[in-house]
Amino acid sequence: MNRVLIVTYYWPPSGGAGVQRWLKFAKYLPGSGWEPVILTVDPKYAVYPATDASLEKEIPAGIKIFRTKATNWFRLYGRDKSKVPSAGFANNRDDTLRGKITRFIRGNFFIPDPRRGWNRHALGKAVEIIQQENIKHLITTSPPHSSQLIGLALKKRFPGITWIADLRDLWTNIYYYELFYPTFISRAVDRSWERRVIRKADRIITVGHNLAKALSRGIDGAGEKMHVLPNGYDEEDFAGIQDETPGRFTLTYAGTLSEAYPIDGLLEALASLEKKGIDFVLRFAGSVPDGTRSQILSRISTGKTEFIPYVSHASAIKLMRSSSMLILIIPDTPLNNCITPGKVFEYIASGKPVIHIGPEDGDAAYHLRKCGQKGFFGGNDHAEMAEYIMNTMDSGKDLTPTDHPEYSRRMLALELGKFLTV
């Protein structure tokens, strides 16, 4: 087989959507004639916002995995890694003086991000792997965007290698970027790194069309090298998990929530239903900030709310399959039409109705609409949301589950294999 080196910071036992993307590609790429070789960080030196040890069982047998040390620039949080901010401080924002100083340091002294402490170790190992394994193709995936600088250095060292940069999210235009208080100089340096990566990479893959347009804007020739390869779902993850109809109408939000996510309209819609004596359960599975939790409990009765801490990927799918409706909320921020949470495709595979709160022209809405979903709303459309929820309750039925092979991880891996071959 042809070999492709995949450089990824996030790999089991790390959890999250970024792990799923390349774990599944590594699982199915051999079916298209490509042998993945993984370069990642040793878990003893890594700093993960979330862990999911169950994902280690999905690592393909026989796959070559190389792990290296990393310099841990999160030492100021001590030994408690659970306090390390996730998603660029967006999900656990600390507005104390200490928190603001920490964010300023993060945004101006660790560019593009603190996980750059892995780069020196990873680069040396990558050179060794490329030479020993006869690697002709390289993929670097981000966030963390510091991983793309590894690709930049390797392309300079090995100009004949085909370098594909996988950009799963915005870089300097990400919605929480201003939380770092970047100076003019810091912003210019970071933007320079971003533009160099996009210019120097042979090809670029992203997870959505709007994201591809935003990343290529203002960079000559960038649009021509962009290719959209969305996330997807793995049929094997759903095998043996029975669909359930809960006794009480259950709306489930799976994943992390932050203050940037507009939930006022949804809470207003559900509060109006509660006043009418309509029973339901509003369930959150994942991280919810204390302020947001208080906001929810101030509007919805305790007996109608349920908060579940971070769960494994398999448990999250079980929760989806045991729900009446699934909730997708896109942050109310600039360029939010570029955001496609990885769970979108598992929502689709679950066969459940989805209430989408966010831009109707967004990448996430595109995929849901393509699969027959109907519930698209702005953050303040509480009356329309309440009517949609009521109509779904009255129908007493889920969506008719249909196959969407274009979002199968197996099929997407075949597409990636063809992309690599060209």
Image (tube, grey):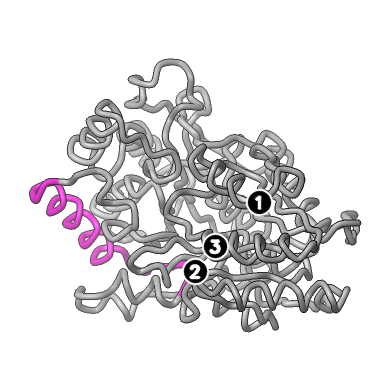
Q: CA distance from mark 1 to mark 2?
A: 17 Å
Residue 107 falls left or right of residue 6: left
What residue occupies the far left of the structure in this picture?
185
Q: Residue at x 12, y 54 (%)?
A: 188
Work out whether 196 lies above or below 124. below
Q: Nearer the viewer, residue 317 or 198?
A: 317
SS of the residue under disc 1: loop
Q: Earlier in the sequence, mark 3 or mark 2?
A: 3
CA neighbours of label 2 inside 10 A, class few (<14), some (14 to 19), many (20+): many
Q: CA distance from mark 3 to mark 1?
A: 18 Å
Given contact means CB atoms under 8 Å apart, are the residues at marks 3 and 1 in contact?
A: no
Q: Nearer the viewer, residue 77 or 283?
A: 283
Q: CA distance from mark 3 to mark 2?
A: 9 Å
> Which mark is on residue 329?
3
Q: Main secondary structure of the magenta part?
A: helix
- Which residues make up the magenta segment? 183-208
Q: Residue at x 50, y 80 (%)?
A: 360
Q: Position of residue 99 (x, y in %)?
A: 30, 30
Given contact means CB atoms under 8 Å apart, are the residues at marks 1 and 2 in contact?
A: no
Q: Which residue is mark 2?
A: 379
Tell me the amino acid under the disc marked 2.
Gly
